[in-house]
Image (cartoon, rainbow, N blue to C red):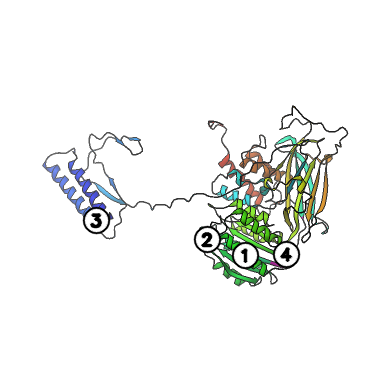
């Protein structure tokens, strides 16, 4: 039905109602006045119907001409509306055309995917004195959760990976003094800030740094998602701007290719010398979003370009930037992982960068980076793009140690319990530590890796596990008590297949009651991650304790990341924390 016909019918119905309704006035004069008003109304409605320009979404009637007996009207929602007593009736009714707001498109369903996991459990040292895990330098979880908090969204617990929160920040671990050892291992032991009866052990690894000018030649393939879902400003436009910041850093000896994928994969830029900045930037500017997401074909073409421009003794890496799933072509995650792992063995690494919201597949992006000997980051702002692609690029590009594994053996004579904070998807079987066939994480030039263990000293009274009724073994008499733990680290130099070993004992006398700012800030970040996951591991500590500790331990903050962290703690508190006087929820 057209707008004009709708107006005519509505006007006619209103006129009919007005003519049949009783009024407060009677007699010939009143009827004449009514007829005049009705005639004017009919003329106005007819004129509106004849107008080709008018677009009527609704008619709003204003006035006070009401039935005298109309005391109540039931609204569609079921609520009863009682109008006030009508004033003296008026003989004319005003009609106003109101344009209804344009219908907003339905919000698409959120299909973001995060790998389900549980926190590492508390371990009894007598039963399991050894803890083994692979290093991790990913940071994507932190910036992705930051994006959610800024949007006023409470992050799902599985989006929070404590080790990526901790490793987002630099703590100034001591660097190696001799390049014959690619990195240095340090430890720090102090009371846990949320429970003075327990302790935190911080293990820090620092790789040697390399000036950008001395980096070996790099063969980079930008594998960029240009599917239709990448249109929004936080996706393809941000991707173009972020990669554009990297281009001026490229040199003549470097090679850059650009592969895109949507419904099918395509080559936008064949292997090109890195100093052709204008040519590379022009190729980025031409990118447009459209189509579905054939990531499998894109990866195959990207690796083909990487092989074509392969640099011996150099850096060969595919950098995959995407917002979500690969929904056509090779969609099996197992098949994609196998493809990436095979290429890793040929010397081509994979880095994954996440963009955007709504369909972001965090689980896949992180896993592909793990099996591809690369790292995973999430870019939510142009500043983050610069941090990842410019400030930290030498760490990303130059691998100084492969298959890096950490093993900590706790002394049961001193430590009754321990738990590793984070690294849940990096835990290794103890026998894999010395098995050089087992893949693990890599460390790039200048990288830092930080891990925290919460430990319970023997006799502290802070044990979390109940005493065993049967089979509770005792520490052998005469066991040494001067060491809390023994840290071992294995790594391979690039191009070598046999690992090397570094060992560092943790003396009991190293316990300090005045920990460094780095230690205190790292503990605040770990507690922040725990609160986002429900706050089950940090006793009575709350958001204000985290913010206060971080504020006091901030120290040097050239890029404002620590100050931003304190702001995020306050944002998270408002989103997640429940007021103390809030009513209890049934079942809690």
| Label 3 Cα neighbours within 10 Å, binned few <14 / some 14-19 / many ≥20 | many
Label 3: which secondary element = helix
Q: How far is disc 1 from disc 4 in space, using C-alphas?
A: 25 Å
Mark 2 or 4, nearer chain start: 4
Can you say whether 359 is above or below 254 in the image? Answer: above
Mark 3 or 4, nearer chain start: 3
Residue hosting label 3: 49
- The answer to the question of whether label 1 and label 4 lie on touching residues, with beta carbons closer than 8 A, is no
Is any part of residue 495 visible from this angle?
Answer: yes
In the rendered structure, the answer to whether residue 67 lies left or right of residue 245 reads left
Is any part of residue 83 visible from this angle?
Answer: no
Q: How far is disc 2 from disc 4 in space, using C-alphas?
A: 34 Å
Q: Quadrant of the C terminus?
A: top right
Residue hosting label 1: 302
Q: Nearer the viewer, mark 2 or mark 1?
A: 1
Q: Toward which corner of the image does residue 256 lie, by quadrant?
A: bottom right
| Label 4 Cα neighbours within 10 Å, binned few <14 / some 14-19 / many ≥20 | few
Q: Nearer the viewer, mark 2 or mark 4?
A: 2
Q: Toward which corner of the image does residue 249 lie, by quadrant?
A: bottom right
Q: How far is disc 1 from disc 3 in space, using C-alphas?
A: 62 Å
Q: Quadrant of the N terminus?
A: bottom left
């Amino acid at each position: 039905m057209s707008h004009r016909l709708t107006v005519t019918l509505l006007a006619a119905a209103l006129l009919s109602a007005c003519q049949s309704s009783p009024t407060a006035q009677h007699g010939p004069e009143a009827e004449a006045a009514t007829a005049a008003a009705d005639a004017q109304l009919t003329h106005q409605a007819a004129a509106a119907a004849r107008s080709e320009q008018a677009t009527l979404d609704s008619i709003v009637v204003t006035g006070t001409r009401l039935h005298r007996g109309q005391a109540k009207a039931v609204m569609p929602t079921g609520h009863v509306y009682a109008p006030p007593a009508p004033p003296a009736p008026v003989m004319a009714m005003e009609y106003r055309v109101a344009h209804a707001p344009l219908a907003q498109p339905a919000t698409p369903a959120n299909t973001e995917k995060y790998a389900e996991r549980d926190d590492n459990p508390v371990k009894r040292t007598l039963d399991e004195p050894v803890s083994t895990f692979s290093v991790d330098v990913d940071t994507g979880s932190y910036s992705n959760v930051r994006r959610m908090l800024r949007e006023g969204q409470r992050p799902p617990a599985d989006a929070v990976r404590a080790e990526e929160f901790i490793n987002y920040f630099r703590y100034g671990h001591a660097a190696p003094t001799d390049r014959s050892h690619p990195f240095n291992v340090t430890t720090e032991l102090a009371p846990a800030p949320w429970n003075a009866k327990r302790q935190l052990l911080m293990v820090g690894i620092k790789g040697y740094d390399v000036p950008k000018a001395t980096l070996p030649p790099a063969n980079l393939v930008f594998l960029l998602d240009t599917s239709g879902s990448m249109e929004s400003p936080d996706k393809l436009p941000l991707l173009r701007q972020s990669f554009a910041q990297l281009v001026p850093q490229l040199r003549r000896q470097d090679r850059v290719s650009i592969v895109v994928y949507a419904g099918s994969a395509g080559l936008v830029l064949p292997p090109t010398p890195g100093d052709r900045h204008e040519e590379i930037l022009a190729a980025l500017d031409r990118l447009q979003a459209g189509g579905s997401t054939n990531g499998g074909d894109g990866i195959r073409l990207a690796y083909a370009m990487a092989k074509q421009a392969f640099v011996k003794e150099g850096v060969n890496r595919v950098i995959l930037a995407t917002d979500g799933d690969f929904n056509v072509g090779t969609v099996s995650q197992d098949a994609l992982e196998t493809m990436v792992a095979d290429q890793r063995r040929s010397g081509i690494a994979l880095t994954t960068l996440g963009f955007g919201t709504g369909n972001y597949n965090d689980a896949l992006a992180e896993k592909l980076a793990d099996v591809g000997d690369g790292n995973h980051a999430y870019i939510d702002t142009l500043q983050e793009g610069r941090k990842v692609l410019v400030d930290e690029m030498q760490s990303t590009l130059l691998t100084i140690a492969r298959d890096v594994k950490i093993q900590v053996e706790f002394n049961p004579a001193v430590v009754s319990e321990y738990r590793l904070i984070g690294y849940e998807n990096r835990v290794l079987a103890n026998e894999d530590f010395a098995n050089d066939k087992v893949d693990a994480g890599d460390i790039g030039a200048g990288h830092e890796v930080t891990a925290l263990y919460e430990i319970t000293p023997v006799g502290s009274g802070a044990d979390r596990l109940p005493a065993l009724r049967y089979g509770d073994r005792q520490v052998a008499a005469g066991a040494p008590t001067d060491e809390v733990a023994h840290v071992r680290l294995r790594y391979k130099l690039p191009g070598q297949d046999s690992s090397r070993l570094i060992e560092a004992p943790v003396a009991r006398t190293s316990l300090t009651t005045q920990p460094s700012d780095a230690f205190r800030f790292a503990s605040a970040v770990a507690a922040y991650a725990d609160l986002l996951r429900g706050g089950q591991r940090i006793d009575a500590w709350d958001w204000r304790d985290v913010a206060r500790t971080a504020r006091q331990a901030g120290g040097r903050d050239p890029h404002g990341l620590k100050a931003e962290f304190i702001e995020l703690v306050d944002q998270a508190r408002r989103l997640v924390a429940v007021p103390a006087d809030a009513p209890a929820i049934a079942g809690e």
